[in-house]
Image (spheres, rainbow, N blue to C red):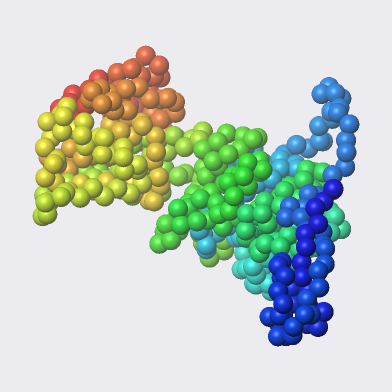
Amino acid sequence: MAKFSTVFVCQLCGWKTNKWVGRCSGCDEWDSMTEEKCEPRLTHILPEYDIESPVCLSDIKLVSKLRTHTYVEEFDRILGGGIVAGSAVLIGGTPGIGKSTLLLQVCQKFSEQDYLSLYVTGEESTAQIKLRADRLGVTSNNIFLVAENNINVILEHIKKVNPKLIIIDSVQAMFKPELESSPGTVSQVRQCANELIQLSKKTESSIFLVGHVTKEGTIAGPKVLEHLVDTVLYFEGEKFMSFRILRAVKNRFGPTNEIGIFEMCKNGLREVQDPSAIFLSRTHNLSSGSVIISCIEGTRAMLVEVQALVTSSSFGMPGRKVSGVDHNRVTMILAVLEKRAGLLLGGHDVFVNVVGGVKVDEPAADLAIAIAIASSFKDIAIPSNTIIIGELGLGGEVRGVSQFDSRIKEAARLGFENVIIPKDNTKESSRILSLTMTEVSSLAEAIDKIC
């Protein structure tokens, strides 16, 4: 049984308090307060569920069409081959990076397959969405728009339209009237997301939840929101660059850490079919400190350019500035260069940058970063037709890397001729006639051969 709470109400003005007072603070009248008992409001409202009996695993029937292709290849790639029926996807990114633009384009692709889409906007008017749709060329009659924040009304719209695809922009703007907290709070976000996901599972409609991000770049709100959904996508990209990277950090129906690369144009987001070409700013006449590496993002190999600049420090404490790679990893590489290769970098400023705004966080880039720093320190340019692959240990040893064949095949496809590889990867490598492979087992050996 629910416990009743006691409140004191003024019979003249209706002012309430949870303790007895002789004089009402609302109307300044004496002896007007009377005691009343009321049932407290629930702080968490559970949605109504249909009780289902347990079903034998062999008796469960799969949906006729598990995945629906959007025919946006980069988008289908990170989802594992298309949008799964009844799946819930959380997509986050900084304001203006292209979340709403991409989802409108996906709605257009869905509508071309005679599927209904419902776009729910909680922060813009339908007229604003219409302006963006006209700019993107989204003109289908199978796309429905509604500007609404009340989750109860939204659920009724979903049941009435019965769409194949639901867009909620954004989940932080939604609220449930039964909860006393304001929109965007932990209880509101969790409750609204939970009811939307449950309805999408029941109706086998796919739902995309747009989420705000914090200053650190993570989804705002409760962390449990990421556990509720099936897939979590993050938009990355510098605001001064036109390229956007959509990264999957969680996917129950496909590989994680997969990325899709887009370019922001006046007509919306355009797919980038050859990402290696955009991340290689120049491959001829490279200056000292520039190195080309082959990294793996999800299931694809990409070539990116790493630049390092080493200069004498003008102050007592040398600077260490890093962009695109892990700062702690670069600090470790600098220590290995001093201890194992004899490069005295303690009195120099070191700057490391990955061209194109892409982020490289795998250990296979260690040797390339170390060679780039050594190249700038000695002011000796690395040949432009050379790729460097390898993980660096604290003892100065060069360790083997995973998916080695994919890395060197991408290098051969783009016309590179020389590859510096770890000795551990020699046996598993496929012989490619157009590539000359140089084996190294230590950092000092690699520096001697190439610098």
Image check: 372 left or right of 230? Answer: left
Quarter of the image where one finds residue 441: top left
* 3 and 86: which is toward the camera: 3
Name the spot of residue 80 as percent of width and height, x first.
62, 37
Can residue 287 be seen here? no
Residue at 16% x, 49% y is: 318
Give residue 260's position: percent from left, percent from top. Answer: 53, 45
**Does any portion of residue 300 appear in the rendered image?**
yes
Residue at position x 67%, y 51% in the image: 190
Q: Is residue 270 above or below residue 289?
A: below
For residue 70, side relative to residue 362 (left or right):
right
**Quadrant where the C terminus lies?**
top left
- The residue positioned 54% from the left and 41% from the top of the image is 249
Please report the residue visible at 62 percent of the width from the left and 54 percent of the height from the top.
Answer: 186
Left or right relative to 322: residue 35: right
Q: Nearer the viewer, residue 20 or 60?
A: 20
Question: Which residue, as the protein is rendered here, is positioned at the far top?
Answer: 427
Q: Position of residue 177 (x, y in %)?
A: 76, 63
Query: Residue 372 at x, y = what percent?
Result: 23, 39
Q: Nearer the viewer, residue 230 or 64?
A: 230
